[in-house]
Image (tube, coloured by chain):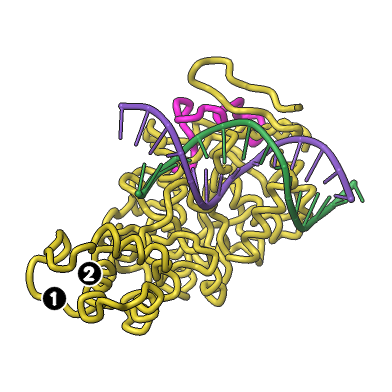
Chain colours: A yellow, B green, C purple
Amino acid sequence: MSKSHVSVTEQTYGEVNQLGGVFVNGRPLPNAIRLRIVELAQLGIRPCDISRQLRVSHGCVSKILARYNETGSILPGAIGGSKPRVTTPNVVKNIREYKQSDPGIFAWEIRDRLLADGVCDKYNVPSVSSISRILRNKIGNLSQPNQYESGKHAPAQASLSYNHIYPYSYPNMSPTGTKMTSPTAVPVTAGHMSISRAWPSAHTVTNILGIRAFMDPTAITGTEGYAPKMEEWSSVNRAAFPSAHGVNGIDKSTIEGDIKYPQPSSTLSSYVSACAYSPTNQYGVYSGPTGGYVAPGHHHWQPQSPVLSHAGSGMGMHAGDIHPMAFKHQAREGDRKPPSPLSKQQHEDLNVHGLSLSTSSS
DNA sequence: GGCGTGACGGTTGAT
DNA sequence: AGATCAACCGTCACG
């Protein structure tokens, strides 16, 4: 075990990997780092070099890049939670109706009917055993009304999605079953992430890396002083990413609606602050020594990369930028892992671990 | 030396 | 409120 605990105070914890990078076991790398990994890879930098420069294990780099190649997203998957229920009230209601109309119906027949009637689809149809359990536990004596129905039978309403009830919308789930935010569950926009960025010259990794926002607290103005939970944060970014397409004029229509939590229009400053961890952030582990990487005041990036420069990229950006290129083109949308369920606070301030990315080796 | 992959220990959030 | 479960995480080591 080369890992060593870094915690020096009760407020900071984390571990240092073999490369000297700080990470929080069990928690995703900051999106900024993830983004950096992808961006560096797009600049042609080898994964092994990215690994060394960012001090992220090569396995992680490989994983992030593979995920990006597969899904077009740099974002981590949804952590935690449980599988969505399939035995929704609507399903139970329909099962009861089937049972009432045909008391001798088999569970597998009910299952088929749920599919045939569009009450469920292949992703959320209950198993036969679940149906049997429903019949046994929830329906039982059909002569008795139950909680799900008080009077007339409502017709099977396949279109009655339980999105508003259940955070996961099966029809929107990826084949991998990754949970996806229901469109109606928590309207989200990512307008604040709709930023273009200038990217430094690819001539040197050092410049490319220029992670001032991580390194230089003075560059982090407007840090809210509160870092939301990582999942919230990542969910924000996850939700935010589609807007990048809007920036690219690819999928703007999908992001202009549901703006419920507009973010400051200053995408640069807001995102820089969002991506910079305050020293009192939740983990504290990425708020290590700063300033040694990019000299404050000398941070000015020019849009030079043909790969990563975009319209309106005149503004210098910091490491925390979520760049449109963080996603692949829309054609990838189909196989992207859907975003994780959005939860309560994720629309609030974006904060990313401050990074201890002292890259003196460069 | 670079890279893909699985085990591992950990976190998270819904149930 | 706490336990359980199943998702995910990044690191590490191996091939």
Q: Which mark is residue A179?
A: none
The answer to whether marks 2 and 1 mark residues whose Cβ atoms lie closer than 8 Å is: yes
Q: Position of residue A156 (x, y in %)?
A: 23, 78
The quadrant where residue A351 appears: top left
* Residue sitting nearer the eye, A345 or A317: A345
Q: Position of residue A274 (x, y in %)?
A: 44, 43
- Quarter placement of the C terminus of chain A: top right
Q: Residue at x 9, y 75 (%)?
A: A152
Three-letter amino acid code at the position of disc 1: His
Tell whether A176 sits left or right of A340: right
Q: Residue at x 58, y 68 (%)?
A: A328
Q: Position of residue A38 (x, y in %)?
A: 65, 56
- Can residue A318 be seen in this snapshot? no
Q: Chain of mark 2?
A: A
Main SS, magenta residues: loop
Residue to which mark 2 is pinned: A93
Q: CA distance from mark 2 to mark 1?
A: 8 Å
Which stretch is magenta? A274-296
In the displayed image of the protein, which residue is found farthest to the bottom? A116
Q: Residue at x 43, y 64 (%)?
A: A243
The lab-note entry on whether marks 2 and 1 share a chain reads yes
- Can residue A61 be seen in this snapshot? yes
In the displayed image of the protein, which residue is found farthest to the left? A151
